[in-house]
Each structure stands twice: as structure tokens, then as C-alpha cells.
Image: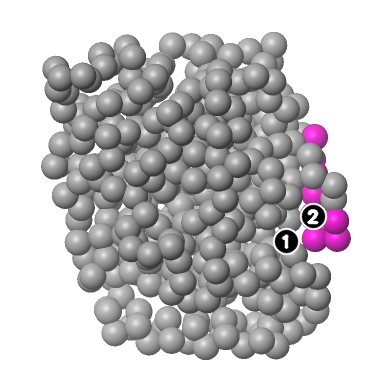
């Protein structure tokens, strides 16, 4: 299995651009053209509970649309790769404004750190669903494509498709992995009962209509197929009284939650999604919630490692997660954002605060 583990420290990472808009494996088609850990003290619960397409086609060695899941050989048009620029950051062009956070190299490095932290939180497993010889796997919100790439390595006989709004995926990936640029909230065009596994990673800041998305996944999954969500929930908690009531990161999350609420996006979706899965028809619902340390304060080495990664994911991403929501939606000034983030950084650097956030794994099965 490919490893993406990164060194620690603000600003560390694998170098400049991780993906490329010109990767021959990055494509755009109408959506759907693809073709439990042992509990510990920090595990809170395990509850059983078309014509306007943006791709260009070449007659020289390129596949037909019906073959796209096998070798993904469409190339992107400039309208997708000409990213939007704001305040020194870049954002996706396709469906501009649907996702409020950057897609540039610093954010790609942060996505890799987030992937590594989630792997550790899942005890270095890619999924909890009991998959048996899956043939078709869809990764919704694939980002740089790390999870999709590792699934392609683990299941070489499966066609793995990673879907995202931004063409920032790895230049090199297993031959059974394809990336699609599209919006998961559009209608899914793949035939019913064709997917074995659908995975969604950290989609709470993106999705406006969860019931519709779950209905689409349910329709596309085979009977017996699984859906699984991996989601950080960035609400702060503390078990030992070391976090002050005016902890600036708490206020930051409150402002961010309000900004996203104004554009019909629910930062707290991870807590509501078990009921939404049931309403969509899924059964055998399993919901795992873990506390995630922020900073290296735990005594356990693995938890300390996770805490360092999580701290850096948050600290390195402060500008990324606040820039557009605070300025474009809440109408803050640039100077107000900069001043407030100084407060947040100061509080995050305080080693006496033993704060945590939460990580959710939610899975359900389409009935046989």
C-alpha cells in the first residue's frame, strides 16, 4: 500500500504542486460515468444504528465515453484548469463558489496531512465496510486522490474513481484509478445497482442537500453494497478543564458555522447523517465517533502523533478555511480576519490547553 505520511511542522510537506491539471488521467464527464476498530477511551460511540461537458476528446488513442472507467484518457479544457485567484490563493473554476476553500499547493499538503491523520484514526485501515472482491468503487470528494490511489493498490481488480470539483490529483496512480471532475450533487448518471462501495471524505463543508446525495448513492449501489463517510467535526471539547471559555478557535468555528449556514451548508452534518442514511433506505448503520487531540499533549505516542498532525492541519489551514467564508459571506475586512487569526494562532500554540475535536466514521449497507 502506498504511504503518504508527512513530516510535522507548519509549512512542511512534499514540495510544490502535488497534482497537475494536465494529468492524462484527470477527466470530466457527467457524474457517474464510472463506468470495526477496537474501542478505546477516546472512542465515544459505535452505534449499530452531455453537450456542455468540460472534456475534450482526441481521436488519436483516446477511449470512448463507454470505456472511460478503464483508462480515463480524456484531457481537461482550459476552462477547468484556469483557477480562480483571490488574495494569493487559488480556488476551483468548475462550478465556481460551490466549495469555499482553496485548491493550491499549501492546501494539497494539508489534505495529505489530513489523510494521514484519518488513516491513524482508523487504525491504518482504508475502510470499515466488509468488502468482498469489490469491482466498482467511487470516492466522492477525492481531493488529491490519496485514498483513491491506496484503494486502487489494495483492490487491483476494482475500477476506482475519484470525483472532485478540482483537477489537483496525483500525476501517477494505479492503472485502475481514474479521476473525474464533477459535482456530486448533480444527478448521478451511472446505471442503478452498479457500485460496490461509495466513500465520502470530509464533505460536511461542501454538501447542501445530503438526502439527495444519499438517495443517489443508494440508487447506484448494488444490493449489499456499502456507503462509508469519514468526517472530521471541528467542534472543540476538553475533558480536564484546561480550555478557557473564550478559546479563540471555538469562536472561529462558530463564525465559520454561521457563514456556511448562510449558504445552506451544515458544518455539523456528521451528527445528523445517521438518520439521513436510514431515511435513504440504508440498513446496518454503524457510527463510530472518536476524540482527536489537538496538539501533542497526550502521553500515548500514537495519540501524540495524531495530535501533532491534527494541530498542523488546523494551524496551517487557518487562512484557507476562513478567507472566503469570512470575507465573501460574513463581509469581514481583510484586517479584521488577520487580527482575529492572530488570536486563534496564539491560543492554538498554548501547550497548557488539552483540546480535542472529533472524527466520525459512518457506514451503511443497501439491503440485499
What residue is at 27 percent from the left and 34 percent from the top?
Answer: 24
* Comes first in the chain, label 2 or label 1: 2
Residue 338, picture quadrant: bottom left
Location of mark 2 (residue):
44
Q: In the image, residue 47 lies at what x, y percent?
A: 79, 40
In the depicted structure, whether residue 275 falls above or below residue 112: above
Question: Could you give the CA–CA distance between mark 2 and mark 1, rounded to whole angstroms?
Answer: 7 Å
> Could you tell whether 120 is left or right of 147 in the image?
right
Residue 181 falls inside the magenta stretch: no
Describe the element under mark 2 as helix, strand or loop. strand
Instruction: Name the mark on residue 291.
Output: 1
Q: Quadrant of the N terminus?
A: top right
Q: In the image, residue 189 lies at what x, y percent?
A: 37, 18
In-front residue for pair 357/105: 105
In the depicted structure, whether residue 299 falls above or below residue 59: below
Describe the element under mark 1 as helix, strand or loop. strand
Span shown in magenta: 40-48
Q: Quadrant of the C terminus?
A: top right
Amino acid at each position: 500500500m502506498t504511504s503518504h505520511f508527512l513530516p510535522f511542522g507548519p509549512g512542511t510537506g512534499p514540495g510544490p504542486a502535488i497534482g497537475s491539471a494536465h494529468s492524462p488521467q484527470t477527466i470530466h464527464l457527467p457524474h457517474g460515468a464510472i463506468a470495526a476498530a477496537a474501542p478505546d477511551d477516546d472512542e465515544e460511540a459505535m452505534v449499530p444504528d452531455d453537450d456542455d461537458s468540460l472534456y475534450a476528446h482526441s481521436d488519436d488513442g483516446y477511449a470512448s465515453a463507454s470505456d472511460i472507467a478503464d483508462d480515463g484518457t480524456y484531457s481537461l479544457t482550459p476552462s477547468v484548469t484556469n483557477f480562480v485567484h483571490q488574495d494569493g490563493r487559488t480556488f476551483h473554476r468548475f462550478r465556481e463558489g460551490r466549495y469555499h476553500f482553496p485548491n493550491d499547493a499549501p492546501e494539497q499538503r494539508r489534505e495529505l496531512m489530513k489523510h494521514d491523520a484519518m488513516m491513524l484514526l482508523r487504525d491504518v485501515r482504508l475502510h470499515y465496510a466488509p468488502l468482498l472482491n469489490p469491482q466498482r468503487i467511487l470516492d466522492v470528494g477525492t481531493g488529491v486522490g490519496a485514498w483513491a490511489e491506496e484503494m486502487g493498490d489494495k483492490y487491483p481488480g476494482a475500477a476506482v474513481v475519484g470525483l472532485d470539483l478540482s483537477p489537483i490529483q496525483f500525476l501517477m496512480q494505479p492503472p485502475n484509478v481514474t479521476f473525474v471532475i464533477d459535482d456530486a450533487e448533480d444527478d448521478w448518471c451511472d446505471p442503478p445497482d452498479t457500485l460496490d462501495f461509495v466513500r465520502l471524505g470530509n464533505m460536511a463543508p461542501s454538501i447542501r442537500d445530503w438526502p439527495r446525495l444519499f438517495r443517489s448513492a443508494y440508487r447506484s449501489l448494488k444490493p449489499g453494497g456499502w456507503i462509508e463517510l469519514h468526517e472530521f467535526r471541528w467542534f472543540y471539547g476538553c475533558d480536564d478543564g484546561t480550555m478557557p471559555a473564550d478559546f479563540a478557535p471555538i469562536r472561529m468555528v462558530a463564525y465559520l458555522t454561521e457563514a456556511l449556514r448562510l449558504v445552506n451548508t451544515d458544518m455539523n452534518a456528521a451528527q445528523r447523517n445517521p438518520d439521513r442514511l436510514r431515511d435513504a433506505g440504508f440498513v446496518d448503520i454503524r457510527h463510530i465517533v472518536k476524540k482527536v487531540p489537538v496538539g501533542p499533549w497526550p502521553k500515548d505516542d500514537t495519540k501524540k502523533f495524531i495530535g501533532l498532525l491534527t494541530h498542523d492541519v488546523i494551524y496551517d489551514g487557518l487562512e484557507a478555511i476562513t478567507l472566503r467564508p469570512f470575507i465573501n459571506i460574513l463581509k469581514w475586512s481583510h484586517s479584521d480576519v488577520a487580527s482575529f487569526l492572530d488570536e486563534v494562532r496564539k491560543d492554538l500554540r498554548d501547550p497548557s490547553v488539552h483540546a480535542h475535536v472529533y472524527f466520525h466514521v459512518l457506514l451503511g449497507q443497501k439491503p440485499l
